[in-house]
Amino acid sequence: MALAQDRAREEFLTAVGPDGLIDDPVELRSYECDGLTGYRVTPALVLLPRTTEQVAAAVRVCARHRIPFVARGAGTGLSGGALPVAEGVVISVQRLRAVLEVDPVHRRARVQPGVTNLDITRTVSEHGLYFAPDPSSQQVCTIGGNVAENSGGAHCLKYGFTVNHVLAAEVVLPDGTVTTLGGDSAHQGGYDLLGAFIGSEGTLGIVTEITVKLLPRPAVVRTVVADFPSVEQSCRTVSAIVARGIVPAAVEMMDTLAIEAVEVAVAAGYTRGAAAALIVELDGPEGEVATQFDQVLGLCREHGTTKLRVAETDEERTAIWKGRKAAFAAMGRISPNYFVQDGVVPRTRLAEALTRIAELADAAGLRVANVFHAGDGNLHPLVLYNESAGEHDRAEELSSAIAELCVDLGGSLSGEHGIGTDKVCSMVRQFTADDLATMALLRQAYDPQNICNPGKLLPTPRLCGEQPGPHKPHPAETAGLAERW
Amino acid sequence: MALAQDRAREEFLTAVGPDGLIDDPVELRSYECDGLTGYRVTPALVLLPRTTEQVAAAVRVCARHRIPFVARGAGTGLSGGALPVAEGVVISVQRLRAVLEVDPVHRRARVQPGVTNLDITRTVSEHGLYFAPDPSSQQVCTIGGNVAENSGGAHCLKYGFTVNHVLAAEVVLPDGTVTTLGGDSAHQGGYDLLGAFIGSEGTLGIVTEITVKLLPRPAVVRTVVADFPSVEQSCRTVSAIVARGIVPAAVEMMDTLAIEAVEVAVAAGYTRGAAAALIVELDGPEGEVATQFDQVLGLCREHGTTKLRVAETDEERTAIWKGRKAAFAAMGRISPNYFVQDGVVPRTRLAEALTRIAELADAAGLRVANVFHAGDGNLHPLVLYNESAGEHDRAEELSSAIAELCVDLGGSLSGEHGIGTDKVCSMVRQFTADDLATMALLRQAYDPQNICNPGKLLPTPRLCGEQPGPHKPHPAETAGLAERW
């Protein structure tokens, strides 16, 4: 057991200093899971470096002794991407929380990975700028975690994901090398390794510095909540808005059950009992927003809305979003336990997907609440269950069935939460053996020792069992690659 | 010499059939260069496969015999990315030119790599859709080449590059494996290998099928050409438009010399003698475009435009674009030879960059014409020279100095033409040894035999000599990697 050796521990102490190492068993428990609390593993050590050089030194110790390591931001991830490895170390970026530079002229900021998503916007707001990706956890989640998971949020329909807002990243590779991916201008020569790194779920290295793009605050923002008598009508409205050539800043949908939970929890003013509530937000220059907002209201009416509630003040808009962003947490008010899925379907198949999810839920005898990014087809079905009533396994099966339904409808397993530990064995539903072997080539090139967040993202026979179906051997496998991951 | 062996030739014949193999010395000459005509190498063989399976079979022959191969679309690239390797084969995708599927509901099309950029739009226009990236060579360049180079075009300011319009790609890897990167919905799990592949300049494999996104034709398009008494005033106008929160579909700039060449060649109606002409195009819903177009005209007036020419008909708009897109070819009318550069600078440093370029040109005693994508800071300085007057070397030096100036101003070597053969030795100006070694890790993972477009993209001591400056050895180098590329 490598960590039992005084030598590795001594080297970690040299790398991060005595106050940067946690090995007290009680303290270690704080790091045993992320937001996917159903999986828990206690790590051997937690390291809290204060500089890029300390991160690199810690990773070099791991590489020398072949000790697995897992990077961790705020631990708010929902797919178990930051689940520790037993006998391994967790490298937390919580102490790397400086905003290093704000450049309002070029509209960019250089920050350390432990800075929270919302703190970037708070720091630059005096210049009329903001950072666009806005996951619901933005008050606590870190930009480092956002880079690892390629996080989205309600406004990614118009503005894109984290990958669309990062110009450059300094990263520590699994051998301890420090390198920079991307650069200050939008177009770089060479491979787009920055694009491959963002969303790699901590398997290609640890990000230690991020240059983000900033956007000017839009001149005007208009928000409406439209109630509908059926989920299907709300879905058709979404398609109609997009077909009209309008790209809203956000289009979010909540069904009866989600509305109920939100109202019990935060009383955000949604109509209890409505079959579906659609939140549509437009932003941009005044002339554009005014014209298009009228069109949106008209399309809602054409599709049978029963109530239009337009936010007349910033406070009203804030209340609408507070309700939406609290939806996951609010589930505790109507169910003891829940699983959340994150599948994507083509937008034109939203109504079909929701009908099938309802059928699956009925068959399983469980409730499913839906709250999701309708504009880009990213579902977040919440499978409600009662652990103490023995419903756990049934709920887990239903949850997996929903994820695989999304793949069958031409979509994918995850829109923004990541594969992590949670969906690793479902990857074979979406990708062929050749596809997965091609991903493994990249992983092995960066991490030949398999020490960088092992067991996440790519399925292995050890984790998932042998998979059925035709399997054409890839050269990588003859090199022992498939066995390693 | 591998190709002299009857065995390899025999296997290529089996792979592509007798009419799919060219070895006639005269015919081979057609393939000796791409649009960067200063570099010429005659390949040993040219293959013309008709199917994905034939491409894969040809690549497997290369892999078995360790024969270098270079993929080629229409050969319009400007950085020598399709320059053949002596003793190697060129694999042309010209016969893979079917549009396999058009799906107007999901707004996507599945095409083979030999389809021209403009033919995609022609095929889908009956549905009111189009393919957004529009390189000036769009009438002849292939979508396969666009994927290899991550091509842009005049409208990439608003709509992005090829990478933003490709959902999935079937590719043949350098060992002959056929795999699919990406998928039908926007978000996939796993690494974004599609993003890393697009723009990899033919060094990671050959694309054999592409699923592109299609956009609905905008309701309204408005175009204006604004003349300015100085280049600097036109640059300040660009910054003012963007600062107002307007994202034009295109913002293009031409200086006196470029206007002169265009007018001599195609008489597009630009004002001869104007210091600078700015083309600004807006598109979108009617209300938005009307409001913003008035703002653009106002900003041009505020910044001292001497003439505003608004296109009142589609024909007038077509003429404006015909002039702009013919600019490179038109240089032949005012100069026997030219080099074109493709550097990017931060938009706020455009005026400074152009002043410095003029100073460099004066010092070298050569003329430089400027025609470029002003909106995203992507310069296309055309260094004019007379080969027979012995100006070649001086022009080449000036051209390189301009590219490196862009890097020094915080930009990059290439916006859309690629690194290829042309700028491979300048890569060390932009990237550190660690950055380049990190790119080499990916390349070696996919192409351990170094047979897939070798000598392009990444510098090597053999191509570029030993580089000065501190060089921290990377583990990859101890594995002999640096020597190979």
Image (cartoon, coloured by chain):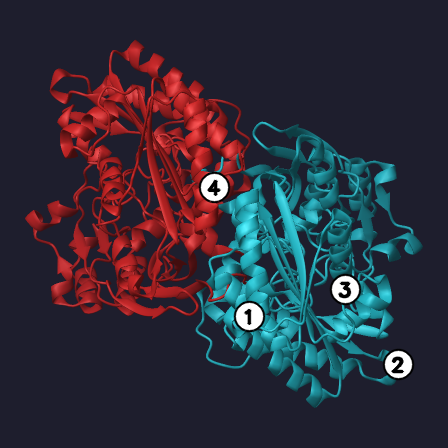
Chain colours: A cyan, B red
Q: Residue at x 52, y 76 (%)?
A: A409
Other-residue count near label 3 (Cα within 10 Å), few / some / many at <14 / 14–19 / ≥20: many
Other-residue count near label 4 (Cα within 10 Å), few / some / many at <14 / 14–19 / ≥20: some
> Which numbered tag is attached to residue A327?
3
Residue B200 is situated, as x and y percent measured from the top left of the image, at: 40, 47
Asked if residue B90 lies left or right of residue A29, the reply is: left
Q: Are marks 2 and 1 on the same chain?
A: yes
| Residue B421 to residue B338: above or below | below
> Which numbered tag is attached to residue A302?
1
**Tag in front: 3 or 4:** 4
Q: Quadrant of residue B384?
A: top left
Residue A480 is situated, as x and y percent measured from the top left of the image, at: 53, 64
Location of mark 2 (residue): A388
Q: Quadrant of residue B363?
A: top left
Q: Quadrant of residue A180?
A: top right
Residue B477 is situated, as x and y percent measured from the top left of the image, at: 49, 39
